[in-house]
Image (tube, helix red, strand yellow):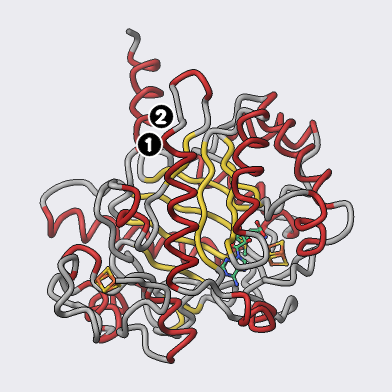
Amino acid sequence: MSIHANLLLQEKEKCYAPPSMLLQWHITERCNLRCTHCYQDNYARNELNFEDLLKILAQFKTLLATLSKRRGKRLHAHITVTGGEPFARHDFLDLLEVFVAHRSLFSFAILTNGTFIDIAMAQRLRQLAPCFVQVSIEGITATHDSIRGEGNFAQTITAIKNLRREQIRTFISFTAHRKNCHEFPKVVQLGRQLKVNRIWSDRLIPWGSGVQLREQLMTPAETKAFFEIMKKYRDKWTWFNHTEIAMHRALQFLVGDGQPYHCTAGDTLLTVQPNGDLYPCRRMPIRVGNLLETPLLQLYDTSPLLQKLRHPEQVSEGCQNCFYAKVCRGGLKCLSYAVTGDPFKTDPGCWL
Ligand SMILES: C[S@@+](CC[C@H](N)C(=O)[O-])C[C@H]1O[C@@H](n2cnc3c(N)ncnc32)[C@H](O)[C@@H]1O
Ligand code: SF4
Ligand code: SF4
């Protein structure tokens, strides 16, 4: 194999392995949609200019270099870039070009609502070669459109087809709650017809507009039943039907008999907001600091919240006697935070 082909293969393999440092970067809060479950309810707050985005990228590189040195091995790093709707920024593709130039340091992926992905954009994305592009499907047409807006289901399907035609790895994200969880099998069927590479699902977190859907949060019994449906469809996967059902979110391993999972927020997941604020996770909106005021490495090292989140012995209140305490550590911390005001309390959806 040529050196070039070998390098490409190594990069592709990096896309499949879980990163040891993931930066989720929300570059804008602007969006052309107004989904009923959205964790935002403001779509016009300050966002950084391109120069400031580059400053943040430089800080991320410093963090990677420092942690790699401390650990004596190079970190496998990844950036998922999102919003809001990332394509709503006119300089989004310029930022992706910068990421391409850094491919040896980190891989990258895009989370989008898909509405900007016509044939030409899919061709452009193919050249940029992200690890994957994720779009969102919330159920069958009527359910999806009632959440994302009339006609959006058809638009999203078109985006998926455009992406798959260009052989771009395409994921579907399904945000589960009482109104749509029973439609997951239909989404799996659709995803398999469209040959998407992966479907994954996490639970609704009641922030922003999503607060209105608080009543739709699944009970512990409903959560378990939903994960069992996921497992049933995951187990129907075969190598020739392309679509993997991923079950590596909080509590899913309890029914999925997969790798034990604990929430990575603040540990191997850090999130930057459009104005440069640092959160452990977008769904755990606790401001650790702002990167235009304090460098990322300093916040990573000194924030008591990040230190607590990544402490290997940290186990949430109410979970101490659980058999899975050491591997699960409390489930979905952002849900605990949204529901109880404390991320270090047992996942409200846990049935154990
Ligand atoms: C905020 S979006 C950003 C990308 C793009 N705008 C989209 O909607 O796909 C990323 C993912 O988070 C999901 N999401 C939005 N609000 C949520 C909430 N309150 N709880 C859980 N997931 C949410 C979206 O459905 C989407 O799959
Ligand atoms: S969920 Fe995504 S597409 Fe929907 S309003 Fe929020 S940011 Fe926009
Ligand atoms: S009781 Fe706590 S540690 Fe045990 S599975 Fe539930 S959330 Fe995880």
Q: Position of residue 158 (x, y in %)?
A: 79, 37
Q: Which residue is labeled 1 in the image?
A: 16
Q: Residue at x 66, y 25 (%)?
A: 166
Of circles 1 and 2, the one toward us is 1
Q: Which residue is labeled 2 in the image?
A: 12
Q: Quadrant of residue 6 in the image?
A: top left
The answer to whether 206 appears left or right of 79 in the picture is right
Position of the N terminus, as image quadrant, is: top left
How many residues crowd mark 2 within 10 Å: few (<14), some (14–19), many (20+)? some
The answer to whether 36 appears left or right of 344 in the picture is right
Q: Position of residue 193 (x, y in %)?
A: 66, 28
Amino acid type of the residue tagged 2 in the rendering: Lys
Q: Quadrant of residue 40 in the image?
A: bottom right
Is the CB–ligand 1 distance for label 1 below 8 Å?
Answer: no
Residue with the most extreme bottom position: 341
Q: Quadrant of residue 315 in the image?
A: bottom left
Label 1 vs label 2: CA separation? Answer: 7 Å
Q: Residue at x 65, y 74 (%)?
A: 47
Query: Is the residue 19 above or below the residue 311 in the image?
Result: above
Q: Position of residue 125 (x, y in %)?
A: 65, 35
How many residues crowd mark 1 within 10 Å: few (<14), some (14–19), many (20+)? few
